[in-house]
């Protein structure tokens, strides 16, 4: 049922200060330079501990700086490690999920955000027999098998897809990989249309044969997806501009039951694909999420049906007038936790009504509200360590709060954010792809914990290195 503007306005008036904030993370502030952070009193903790794990220690091997007591292990590296087939590991590691395998094995599904002409890609995802959607496309997913003994195996989950950016895991133990492109057959050498979601099963290789896009979820520049395990809805982000992208919801058809392989049985027009339309506590329409410049801002959400989800003639986001939907710049990572969906807007610049260096929103499906949890102000000097910008992939930590993968300018980090509104560094990329005078550090991606919470996995996208990080993890301080 849709929450009307009138109902949301009445709710806000009754509470006096908007809808109450709930959930394990609470209202988060950001790192130095954050908008509105100075308006919040500094949070105190029960035990007086500072959040995080202390300063980062430079890495003599020039890969990852970590806090004292932490270690990393390289699982895969583009052009160096091998798949079972003998092919070298593909490049551009991105969105990742973990799954519990047999006998203590951790299974990871890793996206490879490779796009364009396959012949120009040094290390594309190999065209494994029976696992190819479009032989002209260079992207796809690999499945990485990490054993307690340290042994690592890799194989192809899906191939022949394009620009596999983020995605999301499902409650039934599979991975949904998202194509961040709108290429049609005939564009950039493609032989099939792209811009779809594909399901990859890390536990059953046979289930991945003859890849089929889940067209019911639309064809657009997909970024990430999460599943509401209670209602069966899927939420999806779009990383696009001119105009800015949208936040989507897919409502399954009546009687549909989720499960392994069920999405690929859907008709192309099954269910309803919708785009978010937000309004403030006064019932006023909000045209862009960048309008929010204060942590704790709460918007009500309605949903507008997408006219043509396959975008046969017009891109999905362009099928709406500006007063019909709420847009957002660089809508990227998502994670389901605390009974709702965390949604990242990586940054906003001149194409947006207000500028920022990152937002994290929380969508509460029960209240039908979107609450601003994290807000990064403009980073005055990205070349200096200590300030953060451009969050991308996201996960909810088993030790409290959020973990964000930085995809900004200059120095790149894995960032922790506690539920008391404090941020702290977990790792820093020290692999300089540029020069000493003009350094270049690739983004972090695919941040996710192992099923048992003991290992944090993350990748440096270029040249493409997947890390397993271990150390003295501990519960982060709670707010009062």
Image: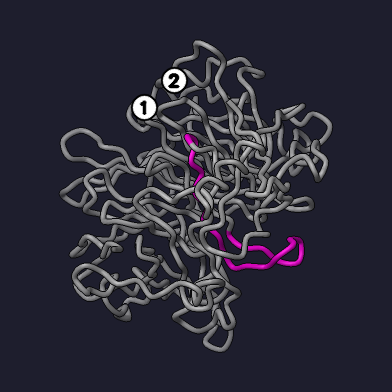
Residue located 40% across and 54% down the image: 447
Q: Position of residue 307 (x, y in %)?
A: 76, 27
* Callout count: 2
Looking at the rendered structure, the secondary structure element under dot 1 is loop
Q: Is residue 246 above or below residue 415?
A: above
Q: Is residue 7 above or below residue 20?
A: above
Q: Is residue 47 above or below residue 225?
A: below
In the visual, does 10 lie left or right of 94?
A: right
Q: Quadrant of the C terminus?
A: bottom left
Residue located 38% across and 57% down the image: 402
Q: Main secondary structure of the magenta part?
A: loop
What label sits on residue 258 in the rendered view? 2
Q: Are marks 2 and 1 in contact (CB under 8 Å)?
A: yes
What's the magenta region?
A: 346-366
Q: Does residue 147 appear in the picture of this structure?
A: yes
Q: Position of residue 439 (x, y in %)?
A: 54, 81
In the visual, does 204 lie left or right of 197?
A: left
Residue of label 1: 172
Tell me which corner region of the image, top left, top right, bottom left or bottom right, holds residue 399. bottom left
Q: Does residue 213 appear in the picture of this structure?
A: no
Residue reaching furthest bottom? 437
Mark-to-mark CA distance, 2 and 1: 8 Å
Residue located 63% across and 49% down the image: 281
Residue 335 sits inside the magenta stretch = no
Q: Quadrant of the N terminus?
A: top right
Q: Is residue 393 above or below residue 85?
A: below
Q: Position of residue 437 (x, y in %)?
A: 56, 89
Residue 360 sits inside the magenta stretch = yes
For this rendering, which residue is in front, 112 or 337?
A: 337
In the visual, does 352 lie left or right of 361?
A: right
Please tell me which of labels 2 and 1 falls first in the chain: 1
Residue located 61% across and 29% down the image: 2
């Amino acid at each position: 049922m849709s929450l009307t503007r009138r109902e949301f306005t009445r709710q806000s008036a009754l509470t006096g200060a908007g809808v109450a904030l709930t959930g394990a993370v609470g209202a988060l502030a950001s790192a130095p330079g954050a908008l509105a952070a100075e308006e919040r009193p500094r949070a105190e903790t029960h035990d007086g501990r500072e959040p995080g794990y202390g300063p980062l220690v430079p890495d003599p091997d020039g890969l990852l700086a970590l806090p004292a007591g932490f270690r990393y292990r390289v699982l895969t590296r583009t052009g160096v490690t091998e798949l079972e087939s003998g092919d070298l590991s593909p490049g551009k590691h991105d969105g990742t999920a973990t799954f519990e395998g047999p006998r203590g094995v951790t299974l990871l599904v890793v996206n490879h955000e490779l796009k364009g002409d396959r012949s120009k890609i040094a290390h594309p995802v190999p065209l494994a027999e029976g696992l190819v959607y479009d032989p002209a496309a260079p992207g796809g997913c690999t499945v990485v098998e990490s054993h307690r003994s340290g042994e690592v195996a890799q194989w192809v989950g899906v191939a022949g897809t394009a620009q596999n950016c983020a995605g999301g895991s499902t409650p039934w133990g599979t991975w949904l990989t998202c194509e961040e492109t709108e290429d049609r057959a005939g564009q950039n050498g493609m032989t099939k249309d792209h811009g779809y979601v594909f399901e990859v099963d890390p536990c059953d290789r046979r289930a991945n044969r003859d890849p089929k896009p889940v067209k019911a979820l639309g064809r657009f520049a997909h970024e990430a997806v999460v599943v509401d395990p209670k209602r069966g809805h899927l939420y999806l982000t779009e990383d696009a501009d001119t105009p800015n992208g949208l936040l989507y919801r897919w409502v399954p058809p009546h009687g549909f039951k989720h499960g392994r392989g069920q999405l690929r049985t859907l008709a192309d027009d099954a269910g309803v694909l919708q785009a978010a339309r937000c309004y403030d506590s006064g019932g006023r329409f909000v045209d862009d999420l960048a309008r929010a410049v204060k942590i704790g801002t709460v918007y009500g959400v309605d949903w507008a049906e997408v006219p043509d989800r396959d975008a046969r003639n017009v891109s999905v986001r362009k099928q709406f007038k500006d007063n019909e939907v709420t847009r957002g710049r660089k809508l990227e990572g998502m994670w389901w936790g605390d009974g709702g969906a965390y949604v990242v807007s990586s940054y906003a610049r001149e194409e947006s009504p207000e500028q920022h260096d990152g937002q994290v929103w929380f969508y509460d499906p029960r209240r039908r509200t979107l609450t601003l949890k994290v807000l990064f102000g403009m980073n005055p000097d990205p070349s200096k360590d200590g300030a953060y910008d451009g969050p991308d992939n996201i996960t909810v930590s088993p030790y409290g709060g959020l973990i964000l993968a930085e995809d900004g300018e200059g120095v790149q980090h894995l960032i922790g954010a506690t539920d008391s509104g404090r941020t702290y560094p977990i790792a820093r990329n020290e692999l300089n792809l540029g020069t000493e005078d003009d350094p270049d550090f690739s983004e972090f991606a695919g941040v996710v914990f192992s099923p048992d919470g003991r290992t944090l996995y993350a990748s440096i996208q270029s040249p493409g290195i997947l890390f397993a990080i271990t150390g003295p993890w501990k519960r982060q301080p709670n707010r009062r």
